[in-house]
Image (tube, rainbow, N blue to C red):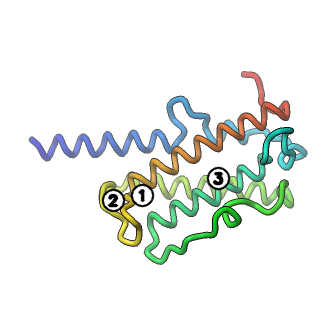
Amino acid sequence: MKAMNEGRKDKALREHVLYLLDGGGAHAKFDDIIEGVPAKLRGQIPRGLPHSLWMQLEHLRIAQWDILEFSRNPKYAHRKWPEEYWPTTDAPPNASAWSASIKKFRQDLKAMEQLVKNPKTDLFARIPWGEGQTILREALLLADHNAYHLGQMLDIRRLLGAWPAK
């Protein structure tokens, strides 16, 4: 009976984490934030803010990839903060760079979700090449980081007059 209860708890925990990773609850969803962003606004920085939509998107992609790599790769190498976590330009070089960043973000998010979904992944085990981190911590960090920056992107869109009233 105890093992069955533990199995239910494990399944419930995984479902909660997946819900957060997908932007569930009070969080804005990635696809809603990036849908319909006019190309001419992708590199604009609103007055009083430090980043453009492109800079935020690339930062999200890079940081998410970094968290995923740390979670699964024993040969993970730390990046330099902050220079290797932000793009060097305000705007994407072209429309394909914008699309590629979105595609890669989705792929890496899916990979983290698969890691969490996999019942063989011990969410509580320390990552051997880390300093006490667990897959659970990294997945929650990723959900939190994404939610934070997606909220910033929503504000940028509002300030640029590009957030649709629904």
> Which disc, if any, is residue 121?
2
- Compared across the picture, whether 95 is left or right of 68 comes to right
Identify the residue at image location x=52%, y=51%. 142
Number of callouts in the render? 3
> Is 111 in front, or is 50?
50
- CA gap between label 2 and label 1 equals 7 Å
Amino acid bearing label 2: Thr
- CA gap between label 3 and label 1 equals 19 Å
| Label 3 with label 1: CB-CB less than 8 Å | no
Q: Residue 104 in the image: x percent, y percent? A: 64, 59
Mark toward the start of the polypeptide (2 vs 1):
1
Residue under numbered circle 1: 115
Q: Image quadrant for the C terminus?
A: top right
Q: Residue 154 in the image: x percent, y percent? A: 71, 35
Amino acid bearing label 1: Leu
Identify the residue at image location x=45%, y=63%. 71
Determine which quarter of the picture holds residue 82: bottom right
Q: Residue 88 in the image: x percent, y percent? A: 80, 63
Q: Image quadrant for the N terminus?
A: top left
Circle 3: element type: helix
Residue farthest right in this picture: 40
Identify the residue at image location x=86%, y=61%. 93
Amino acid bearing label 3: Leu
Mark toward the start of the polypeptide (3 vs 1):
3
Circle 2: element type: loop
Residue under numbered circle 3: 60
Determine which quarter of the picture holds residue 91: bottom right
> Which disc, if any, is residue 11?
none
- CA gap between label 3 and label 2 equals 24 Å
